[in-house]
Amino acid sequence: MKIGELATRTGVTTRLIRYYEQQELLEADRAPNGYRTYTEAHVERVSRVAGLVQAGIPTRLVKVLLDTEDAAARKQPTCPREVAEQLATELVGVQARIDCLTRSRDAIRSFLTATQHEVLLREEREPAVAV
Amino acid sequence: MKIGELATRTGVTTRLIRYYEQQELLEADRAPNGYRTYTEAHVERVSRVAGLVQAGIPTRLVKVLLDTEDAAARKQPTCPREVAEQLATELVGVQARIDCLTRSRDAIRSFLTATQHEVLLREEREPAVAV
DNA sequence: CTAAAGTTTGACACCAGTGTCAATGTCAAG
DNA sequence: CTTGACATTGACACTGGTGTCAAACTTTAG
């Protein structure tokens, strides 16, 4: 698929898709005419990149995180101690963000319940840009 | 306490504390000499502001979130339907970020375990800037 | 064949969050 | 009283993520 379709399917602008590629978060094959071509797998990838960036992770780190996800999936058997330590450090940063956001989320939820608006919590479907 | 102490205790620079105040995320009393004075409660507040900002929440929203936390704590009995809907919307955005980060966190964890570095997971203490 | 829609690269621009510096004022210790 | 540490405000500047526009090319539809 071409960049336009990828954009509509992920809800990420073409501008950003190209930007992410430039930051080396994405790779794209080129058709003979020079157009970028993407596979199904890219849809997922782009969504995750965008999601992490929106969660305040700088692109440099996004790369590391996604690479780790791949490595974890492929059951990489080993890695240098130093890399592992770096990851462990990032881990606490990520966890801190999660805790912080979770707290706000819970506050919103209890507020909505306390004010008789639980109905709105039912609509808590279809994540905006999640994944 | 004065701004310097608040800064060291929260790990947030004085520059940012003043910036947050300017963005109306913080309020400070003034001593007769014009110095800002803070209470214990501010320590918590500043940490949360910084945490949310680092989690990619724009300051305008941070204000809304923290206000909601206060309201939830004070058992506010009601609020206009429109406000509630706005909050419900933000909720899905926040949840999306949480999901996204959680996924990366889990990936890091399983990667570290898979590579015999579980030791490092023990050190998952003292959050950097959490709260 | 032509027009419209989509793509490419590259430039310019904007905004929010931060750092840093300067000039001035306050206060505590020697 | 002087010095040094800390505050105040305000300005300037940088960076990263985005929007937008332009010029040139490709592909698709009519």
Image: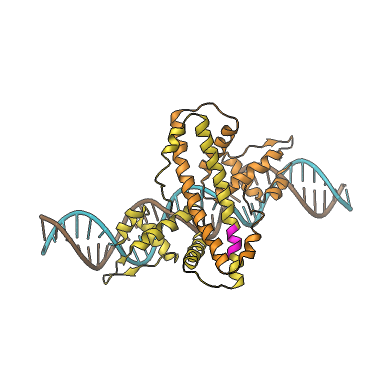
Chain colours: A orange, B yellow, C brown, D cyan
Image quadrant in which the N terminus of chain B is located:
bottom left
Residue B65 vertical position relative to residue A72 in the rendered view, above or below:
below
The image shows residue A45 at horizontal and vertical percentages of 63, 41
Instruction: Please tell me whether residue B130 belongs to the stretch shown in magenta.
Output: no
Q: Nearer the viewer, residue B8 or D27?
A: B8
The residue at 53%/34% (across/down) is: B111
Q: Which residues are magenta?
A: B87-91
The residue at 51%/41% (across/down) is: A61
The residue at 41%/47% (across/down) is: B128
The image shows residue A87 at horizontal and vertical percentages of 47, 37
Dividing the picture into quarters, in which one does residue C26 lie? bottom left
The image shows residue C29 at horizontal and vertical percentages of 14, 57
Q: Is residue A50 visible?
A: yes
Q: Nearer the viewer, residue A128 or D12?
A: A128
Residue A82 vertical position relative to residue B94 in the rendered view, above or below:
above
Q: Nearer the viewer, residue B25 or B42?
A: B42
Query: Is residue B15 found left or right of A121 in the rendered image?
Result: left
Residue A66 vertical position relative to residue B51 in the rendered view, above or below:
above
The residue at 51%/71% (across/down) is: B76
Q: Nearer the viewer, residue A110 or A29?
A: A110
> What is the chief secondary structure element of the magenta stretch?
helix
